[in-house]
Amino acid sequence: MPPTPSKDAAQPERRGFLGVAAAGLAGILLAPGVRLIEIAQAATGTASAGADPQVRWGMLIDSTKCSSGCTDCVTACRSENGLPENPGPTDAQWIRKIEIKEIRTGRTQSLPVMCQHCAEPPCVDVCPTGASFKRADGIVLVDKHICIGCRYCVMACPYKARSFIHEPVTGQKPDVPRGMGTVEGCTMCVHKVDRGEQPACVMACSAAGHGAIVFGNLNDPESEISQRVARYATRQIREDLNLDTGVRYIGI
């Protein structure tokens, strides 16, 4: 009589699941912002080894230099990340221009608003799967592989910075994975930042001669952004929430 197959041999999918679970556990033991795939890529020289915990990436937006009607930053974001050029009411908008008005004086201002990359992000707190996460360098992202589209993060974000993808996505960019049924938001162009480049919105604003957005390391006292934050009075949107946002504003 032939030998009876073992239980594990008869269930290869079980062994596969255990392998995935072990990989997930190993991921938990890694430093914040470092993932197994990044370590594997770093070993072959194809990618960086992960986020630097000594860095806090941030943006400083000078509303006094931001012109009403100018959408250079919005256009650049859409082009860089493969977003719809003319978004409908349900399409993603990673960055948007808003107009604010001082009630007492009637003074109006125009400023871009995007994910504020909070040090204490509410979207991460409410995510049931860990899809919303903060890298060690402060950039808040969504892991599309484990996002279940529950949209808890959309409701938790006080900046309305998260969007849900309702329709199939075409024309995706290789560096910016997107997919129907998942949530997304501004990534600070993390794919460019990890290559030592500036986010698309910052580059576009600078190229147009506005200079309204500065990007850099908030933890480096010698960086331009840190020196400006020290020199000028800056504000955070909804400071009362104590989220310690990575995006700061001048003139609001």
Image: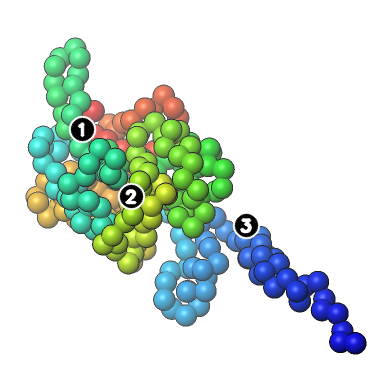
Residue sitting at x 47%, y 54%: 143
Question: Residue 195: x, y in percent?
Answer: 33, 66
What residue would you read off at disc 3? Answer: 28
Question: Which of 183/215 is in front?
Answer: 183
| Nearer the camera: disc 3 or disc 2 | 2
| Nearer the camera: disc 2 or disc 1 | 2
Question: Which of 183/10 is in front?
Answer: 10
Do tag 1 and tag 3 residues touch (Cβ < 8 Å)? no
CA–CA distance between discs 1 and 3?
39 Å
Residue sitting at x 69%, y 73%: 12
Question: The residue under label 3 is which amino acid type?
Answer: Ile
Where 2 falls versus 40 (above or below)? below
Question: The residue under label 1 is which amino acid type?
Answer: Ile
Question: Which of 140/148 is in front?
Answer: 148
The image quadrant where one finds the C terminus is top left
Scheme of image coloration: rainbow
Residue sitting at x 53%, y 42%: 127
What residue would you read off at disc 1? Answer: 98
Question: The residue under label 2 is which amino acid type?
Answer: Glu
What residue would you read off at disc 2? Answer: 167
Do tag 2 and tag 1 residues touch (Cβ < 8 Å)? no
- How dense is the environment of label 1, judged by Cα within 10 Å: few (below 14), some, or many (20 and up)? few
Total label count? 3
CA–CA distance between discs 3 and 2?
33 Å
